[in-house]
Image (cartoon, rainbow, N blue to C red):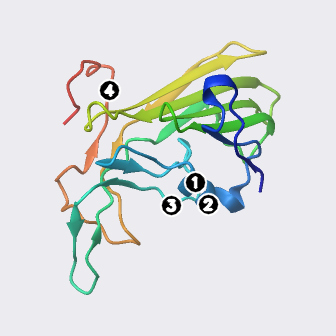
Amino acid sequence: MVIKYNIGKNEYRNWIVGETDFQPAYLGKYETIFTLSNGYMGVRAVTEEAYQEETRGCYIAGLFDKFPGEVTELANIPDWLNVDLKLDGEKYDLKTGKILLYRRQINIKDGQLIRNIEWESPTGKKTRLTFERFISLKNLHFAALRVKIIPLNYSGDIEICSGINGQTTNSGVQHFKEGILANSVTSPGNLSNKPAI
């Protein structure tokens, strides 16, 4: 496990923590260390592309729930981070192909989590990806995710499937009833500032 502390320079000295290797066995630890929160809303630093070793979690302070036979717990709200990518027909998955560059950093001063990757697909197509996210301190109800994709040695179609997954659970127990915030997906027809639900 490679985590580097105090890697910032100048005004960011002592404000940046980073990792330089993608290690699926340590995803749980990294997603805890790189968690973003503004005191009202918090989100574990899971990768945008889902892996079995992760524990996805988005939470609202004070939002507790209890199901029969379970203890009262902080309810896991719908997940807004999942991004599935197909790059010229190939599924983006760091467990396949080669990772040429991997760097994830949390800037504690600015509240940003940035992940930079250069990935070579199993067929040799190289892509540079940047994932940036933050949770606003000014507007406690606002969070954002930006994805940048640059094909390095090919041109082709890029498919992005993103949305809000309302089928979230805490240890297998779903805290929202079926039909309430269940599956809300942003589509090209809904690119306004209004929520998809």
Residue 187, picture quadrant: top left
Q: Amino acid at mark 3?
A: Thr
Give me the C-alpha separation between circle 2 and circle 1. Answer: 6 Å
Residue lying at the far top in this picture: please name it. 155
- Which marked residue is nearer to the observer: mark 2 or mark 3? 2
First along the sequence among labels 3 and 1: 1
Secondary structure of the residue carrying numbered label 3: loop
Q: Nearer the viewer, mark 2 or mark 4?
A: 2
Residue at screen point 67% across, 23% down: 10
- Alpha carbon of mark 2 to alpha carbon of mark 4: how far? 33 Å
Relative to 123, say whether 29 is above or below. Answer: below
Q: Which mark is residue 187?
A: 4
Q: Residues within 10 Å of mark 2 (few under 14, many from 20)?
A: few
Q: CA distance from mark 3 to mark 1?
A: 13 Å
Task: Tell me whether circle 2 and circle 1 mark residues in contact (CB < 8 Å).
Answer: yes
Q: Are marks 4 and 3 in contact (CB under 8 Å)?
A: no
Disc 4 residue type?
Ser
Checking the image for residue 29, the label placed there is 2
Q: Which residue is mark 1?
A: 33
- Residue 36 in percent (x, y) is at 45, 45
- The residue drawn where x is 49% and y is 30% is 110
Q: The disc labelled 1 sits on which kind of residue?
A: Ile
Horizontal placement of 85 versus 26: left or right?
left
Q: Which residue is painted at 75% across and 16% down in the image? A: 152
- Could you say where residue 49 lies in the image, as x and y percent from the top left? 56, 43
Quick check: 153 above or below 138? above
